[in-house]
Amino acid sequence: MKRRTAEPYKIKAVEPLKMLNEQERKEALKKAGYNTFLINSEDVYIDLLTDSGTTAMSDRQWGTLMTGDEAYAGSKSWYKLEQAVKEIYGYNFVIPTHQGRGAENLLSQMKIKEGDYVPGNMYFTTTRAHQELNGATFVDIIIDEAHDSLYDHPFKGNVDLSKLESLIHEVGAEKIPYVCIAVTVNLAGGQPVSMKNMRDVYELCQKHGIDVMYDATRCVENAFFIQEREEGYTDKSIKDILKEMFSYSDGCTMSGKKDCLVNTGGFLAMNDEKLYTRARELVVLYEGMPSYGGLAGRDMEAMAQGIYESIDDNYIKHRIHQVRYLGEQLIEAGIPVVKPIGGHAVFLDAREFLPHLKHEELPAQSLAAALYLDSGVRSMERGIVSGGRNKVTGENNKPKLELVRLTIPRRVYTNNHMDVVADSVISLYEKRDQISGLKMTYEPPTLRFFNARFEPLSPSGELMTNETSSTTT
Ligand code: F0G
């Protein structure tokens, strides 16, 4: 008999949700120009837009808020955070920042020179933007399999060492200020990197005198996959796995809004004292004193506590299993999703889901809008709209992956919520031929996905061309 598991927490405070009826959702969607970013959060039933800053804090974290030391300099709360980062991540030096991109800004400014190359295992939007802003060219060195949504690979976030070696050979090690390794890889579907791969990358880089900097945003999720899948790690604790992972790097940027279990915060960490000394100067310009970096003392307290809670084996096991619980229901129903199911989200393959729509008819945007209309579930388009336009030709970039991301916030929803999401996606799949494509009616010049507006292409002007909703909500 298969034993079922449940959330490793009890619920102490609840936030009641407004449940709009179908007509109200239709109006809300129209008002938002069919863009899920523009829907008011109070009109959303289950919010799977992002796992960033949407975490539920624990009673202990809420408790620490009262003990936050709000001193401008030398705050007690800062020393607690610094201690937690040093103890769990193992780096010598830490600089707090308001969130991950604050750390990316400091790192890119300090290390990159015009004409440099920064190799990475697929890009993340803000990370690459900071690298480019400082004059570097990003080079994708992830294994080819990561670009194939159906290819099942236990460590689909791995670096292809031959790609890295050829780049070093081609441009020279002195043109590569650092290699950026994301653990896990968000845009590949939350896919992990193996310990062996991290070790190999580090060895190769050391041979050439190149630093390895991690994007540690979802490192605890990565550690869980190593424990689950990599030989020799089954009996190791998440804490020990993390320590070993970070030993194969020279520093990291961190968005605390994910695996540090807080609503805001981040940091830059490193082993090199010279780099740290420069970072202490630069952080004052962009974030604040090196003892708060844009954070309130109470935020730093909550993040220190969150870092310790995140390495609890029961917490992280449930976290990954909850995402998988949703993903496996969809796979069983024959829904096209990115495989294997990653750490923080289930990604629907919108081109497979809506084969009657051309790429220009924005399948992922249409599917995200239809999902909200069906059940009030909010998701995020990660496809042609997010891809933007080619700066030179003005043509739409056409990313290979046209996805809808169902991102699961940490400790917020129960498995019953996952069932509601699965039912809605499956019901939509059954009537997928009724989902109309969209056209963009307003296109902002930069990062268009945030504020763009759309209209259905169907002659009736409706998103569902023959509407009969099967949901009860
Ligand atoms: N790196 C990765 C892999 C991320 O996923 C994010 C944010 C960042 C860096 C930037 O961190 O938001 O704290 O400044 N990802 C969010 C998301 C926004 O929805 O995937 P930040």
Image: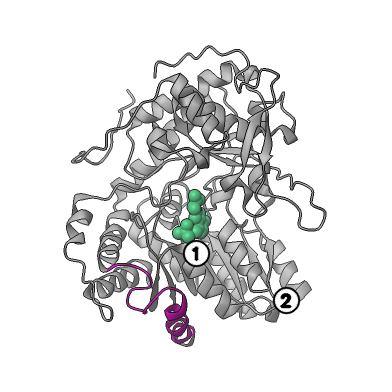
Crowd rating for badge 1 (residues with CA inside 10 Å; few <14, some 14–19, many 20+): many
Rendering coords of residue 394 (x, y %):
79, 52
Determine whether the beta carbon of the residue marked 1 sits less than 8 angstroms from the nearest atom of ligand 1: yes
- CA gap between label 1 and label 2 equals 22 Å
Numbered label tally: 2
Residue placed most toward the observer, 8 or 361 = 361
Rendering coords of residue 250 (x, y %):
49, 75
Crowd rating for badge 2 (residues with CA inside 10 Å; few <14, some 14–19, many 20+): few
Q: Is residue 149 visible?
A: yes
Name the image quarter holding the C terminus: top left
Residue 180 is labelled as none
Query: Mark 2 highlights which residue?
Result: 115
Residue placed most toward the observer, 344 or 313 = 344
Q: On the rendered structure, is 325 left or right of 80?
A: right
Task: Report if residue 238 lies within the magenta region.
Answer: no
Q: Residue at x 46, y 75 (%)?
A: 286
Q: On the rendered structure, is 301 left or right of 416?
A: left
Task: Report if residue 292 lies within the magenta region.
Answer: yes
- Along the polypeptide, which appears first: circle 1 or circle 2? 1
Name the image quarter holding the N terminus: top left
Query: Mark 1 highlights which residue?
Result: 101
Disc 2 marks a residue whose amino acid type is Gly
Name the image quarter holding residue 365: top right
Q: Is residue 183 visible?
A: no
Would you place residue 338 above or below residue 236 in this image? above
Q: Residue at x 56, y 14 (%)?
A: 467
Rendering coords of residue 134 (x, y %):
64, 74
Q: Single out the mark in the foreground, 1 or 2.
A: 1
The boundaries of the magenta stretch are 275-296
Q: Residue at x 39, y 76 (%)?
A: 288
